[in-house]
Image (cartoon, grey):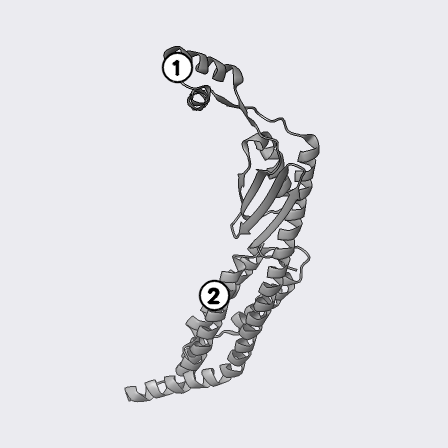
């Protein structure tokens, strides 16, 4: 079973005075590339949260966002009463303004408000860890569903290449006969007598040089191995990529040896299917 690296997971925690939203998004990447955005109050826990995510998501470009919205009366910003009173006292010394007006001016001055660092509530953090697990479960389910779609597409394209290979195998005797006939005509056009034995030897050498028997066998084996890898319990996009390269090598060799237009057309179709496989393989975990 294969998994896609594309996915999305989300969980929402509703606490008495806070709403906590956890989002995890991922795209394809060669390795794990994790970007985290957490509130400053939870900065000290960022490494733990990163490790939690890394244990579940081994590859991909991952964006992790932790949003905390205060919905109740709790607030970290407080009025610095002593400072405000001192400001008002000084302002009153230079102005006989109304107390309300003096307060409006004082509250705008530096240090009139102070932000108290909130200590991490262990119970709240425990719920956040559970929320991250919930989001990870959702993104992994998403990745599995995407993987099923990719697997269906892979099977179809490998089957298409396999079918084209069968046509190549069926066409090969016709190709060999065509090459022989072309060589005979080329010699006849020279209008010179040739040693038939020597000609047959050269013809055998030429046909051996353009023989594609090994390439046909290896290509068939690579296609079967690709399908076997799709059924493995662990998703391995890198391995599928390596097998795709081997498939491409055999297809290219058949194309270069074909020397026969109808067969080269089949090779072009195989290359087209393989390119789509390679593109999709980049997104497999």
Nearest the viewer among 227 and 123 is 123
Q: Which of marks 1 and 2 is nearer the N terminus?
A: 1
| For residue 76, above or below residue 32 | above
- Locate residue 102: give its quadrant: top left
Position of residue 59 relative to residue 128, above or below, is below
Corner quadrant of residue 240: bottom right
Q: Which residue is drawn at 35% across and 88% down?
A: 185
Question: On the image, numbered disc 1 is attached to which residue?
Answer: 96
Residue drawn at point x = 52 percent, y = 61 percent: 280
Residue 91: x and y in percent read 40, 14
At a point 60% along the width and 47% down the height, the residue shown is 58
- Mark 2 residue crowding within 10 angstroms, few (<14) / some (14–19) / many (20+): some
Q: Is residue 204 shown left or right of residue 148?
A: left
Disc 1 element: loop
Query: Which element carries disc 2, helix, strand or loop?
Result: helix
The CA distance from mark 1 to mark 2 is 82 Å
The reply to whether discs 1 and 2 touch (Cβ–Cβ < 8 Å) is no
Total label count? 2
Q: Residues within 10 Å of mark 1 (few under 14, many from 20)?
A: few
> Which numbered disc, 1 or 2, marks the residue closer to the eye?
1
Q: Give coordinates of residue 254: x percent, y percent.
A: 47, 72
Up/down of 62 relative to 100, above or below: below
Read off the residue under disc 2. Answer: 275
Q: Is residue 32 visible?
A: no
Picture quarter with the N terminus: bottom right
């Amino acid at each position: 079973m294969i998994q896609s690296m594309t996915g999305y997971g989300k969980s929402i925690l509703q606490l008495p005075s806070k709403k906590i939203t956890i989002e995890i998004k991922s795209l394809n990447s060669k390795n794990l590339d994790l970007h985290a955005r957490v509130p400053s109050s939870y900065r000290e826990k960022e490494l733990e949260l990163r490790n939690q995510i890394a244990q579940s998501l081994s590859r991909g470009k991952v964006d992790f966002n932790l949003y905390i919205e205060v919905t109740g009366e709790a607030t970290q910003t407080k009025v610095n009463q002593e400072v405000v009173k001192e400001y008002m006292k000084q302002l009153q010394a230079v102005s006989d303004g109304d107390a309300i007006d003096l307060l409006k001016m004082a509250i705008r001055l530096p240090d009139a408000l102070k932000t108290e660092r909130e200590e991490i509530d262990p119970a709240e953090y425990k719920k956040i860890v559970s929320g991250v697990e919930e989001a990870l479960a959702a993104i992994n389910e998403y990745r599995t569903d995407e993987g099923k779609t990719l697997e269906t597409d892979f099977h179809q394209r490998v089957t298409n290449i396999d079918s084209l290979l069968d046509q190549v195998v069926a066409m090969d005797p016709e190709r060999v006969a065509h090459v022989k006939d072309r060589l005979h005509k080329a010699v006849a056009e020279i209008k010179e007598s040739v040693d038939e034995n020597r000609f047959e030897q050269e013809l055998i050498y030429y046909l051996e040089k353009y023989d594609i028997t090994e390439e046909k066998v290896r290509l068939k084996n690579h296609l079967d191995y690709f399908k076997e890898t799709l059924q493995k319990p662990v998703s391995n996009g890198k391995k599928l990529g390596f097998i795709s390269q081997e498939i491409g090598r055999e297809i290219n060799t058949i194309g270069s040896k074909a020397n026969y237009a109808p067969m080269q057309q089949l090779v072009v179709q195989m290359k087209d299917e393989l390119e789509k496989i390679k593109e999709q393989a980049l997104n497999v975990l």
